[in-house]
Amino acid sequence: MFHMVLQNSIAGMAIGLLYGIIGIGVCLFWQTTGLINFAHISSAMLGAYLFYTFNVMWNFPIVVSFALAIALVACYGIFILRGVVHKQIMKRRGGRLEFIVATMLLNTFMVNLVIVIWGGVPYPFPRIFGSPMRPLRIGRVAVQHHSLWVLLFVTALVIGLNYFFKRTLTGKALRATAQNRDTASLMGVEVEKMTSLSFALSTGITALAGILLAPIYFVSVELGGGIIGIKGFASAVIGGLTNPFGALIGGLLIGLAENFAVFYISSSYRDVITFVLLVFFLVARPQGLFKRM
Amino acid sequence: MRKFRVIPLVILLIALFAGSVFAQETVKFGLVAPFTGLGSILGDYIKEAMMLAVDEINAQGGILGRQIEVIVYDDEASPATAINVVKRVIENDKVLVCFGPNMSSSVLGVHQVALENETPMLVGATSPSLGFDQLGNPWVFRLRADDTVRVENQAEYAVKVLGVKRPGIIYGTTDYCTSARDVIIKKFAEYGIEPVAIEQIREGDKDATGQVLNMIRAGVDSVMGLTHESEAAVFVRQMRQMGLDVPIVGFTAWGVPAFTDLAGEAAIGVIAVQSFTPEDPNPVVQEFVQKYVDRYGRLPSDPGQAYYDGVYVMKEVIERVGSFDKHAIREALENFSGYVGLQGELVNDEKHNLSRFTLISEFLGDSWKIIQKY
């Protein structure tokens, strides 16, 4: 019995890490712009499809495909800023509400665009993170190589982001812009440049998340239209929206709660638990698990 | 000036006249299938197989001397679009027969149009709720075996051939999955067998550890898969990872490339219910496969064979009644039998199912091996 509980915990953490990594992108965007981007998850989908196109269809090397996919999605982030926010919303004196509606619709548009270009049938992801059939076995417990890769990427990402925001001048300027645009501008921060950077950074990281998710989620429109976006958002809210590390813990919490709900209650309640947790945190602890970073 | 007005008028008259002459020489078949949207790949398979049959018949002189003209519309796998295009194909284009839609929920939304306009509708959708016993629409006929028949065959195979005693069931949340679950539980009960684990996986979920562990705890001796393709791939992979080594008998979504491509080597050994496989050694099927590959450069896939058969059924029916009268055609369909197609002999039953054809096959890694035919 003990090995079953352990196996369930490990699988829960593995999927939770993936929710968390989507949550990190949500946090990053909120941290630097004070907005929620509802087209956020489309970046993950684009990242996965572009990587697949470069690596599998065009036979580019893995590293090149990785870099190209992430860079292109970062450009897509800048397009959201210039094409949607500046051209459409600010010109028409729209605010947060308009941004939410615009990004929601943009997400639907992107999902349909992907269906037109790549078709609606999911593609299997190449086995660059190890074969799912031959997991690492520790005693009677199986651990996916993919999960270890995700753990590695996520740890590096959290440490890197922490360093970037706290130690570098650009990082500090980004935080200053988020806190108060006018003051930051008066202090000599190039506010426009910083906003572009924050859009590019959050979409780029989400693209990375998309590529990491693809071995589990396949290269499918589910990455852009499915429940993963909501779960990533829930992880960010549970973690406090301002703390990438918190989003990760939030994701782990959801992953574990879901898997144990299946194990001890019923498999039909799997998704219910995410929303129960989300509502609980919104009501009882709206500031999230952790304080502002 | 005046003669310049006369010339276009004459051209117009000629065009109209020519048009009416041309229209007399063709018989119009409508096709409504998904070419964009989530089911887009199915539309291509359906259209390709159907056009193959149509061109063969046209090359041999058509039906009662008339060439077949196919009018194709895209329903985007959406019931809302289906209602628009079905209305258009039946009311504006005035087709003799409408093939499709292929999605059960779309057929539920549009079958009334066929009834109001008294036009036969031949569909490949498989939900039990479309049967004549449920729908009560005399104009709708089904070209493939319905899901009830197929799930019953799945249970029968599991019990009689594999000898399962403690099956576990994994199913999804859509109508396709839940009605299959109800049918299989009922069928198992007829054999005095009660499933020891009934687990659900939601569409889009990518982790089934809990469900697999519950099956291990319950001590299942086999798994009945009643999910869609992606969830089937997730479940099978995790079963293999966690060492649950029992026979897997899956429903139709477990017998298509969309599943085997995603699951990879984990799919090897999976037994599934199929409506069609290009590996079927039946010479009629092999001839069809050969013609299909020669023309399109790829293998045909389910549900293409149903529409190929459907076109020939229409030819047969029209030739039997000797006219293009829709009422006579409907009645002939009602009593249809005696035509052997890709799915064996097509006989209309009380549910308006023209076929009960089901295959039980095992996946070998790059192809399917047919174990049993029903």
Image (cartoon, coloured by chain):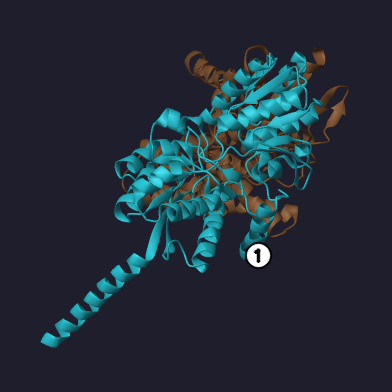
Chain colours: A brown, B cyan
Quadrant location of the C terminus of chain A in the rendered image: top right
Does residue B226 show up?
no
Q: Determine if residue B284 is in view.
A: yes
Across and down, in percent, residue B29 comes to 42, 55
The image quadrant where one finds the N terminus of chain A is: top right
Give left or right: position of A218 versus A280. Answer: right
Q: Nearer the viewer, residue A141 or A234?
A: A141
Quick check: A36 above or below B22? Answer: above
Which of the 4 quarters of the picture holds residue A25?
A: top right
Residue A50 image point, x, y percent? 62, 52
Q: Residue at x 34, y 46 (%)?
A: B327
**Residue occupying the point 75% across, 17% down:** B165
Residue B37, given in percent of the width and then of the height, sits at: 49, 47
Please say if B190 is above or below B145: above
Q: Nearer the viewer, residue A244 or A118?
A: A118
Task: Report the residue marked by disc 1.
Answer: B294
- Location of residue B13 by image quarter: bottom left
Residue at left 59%, top 54%?
A: A72
Residue B148 point in image, percent of width and height: 56, 29
So how many labels did they put on this image?
1
**Tag 1: Cα neighbours inside 10 Å, few (<14), some, or many (≥20)?**
few
Describe residue A246's horizontal placement relative to residue A185 as left or right: right
Residue A23: quarter of image: top right
Residue kind at label 1, given as amino acid type: Asp
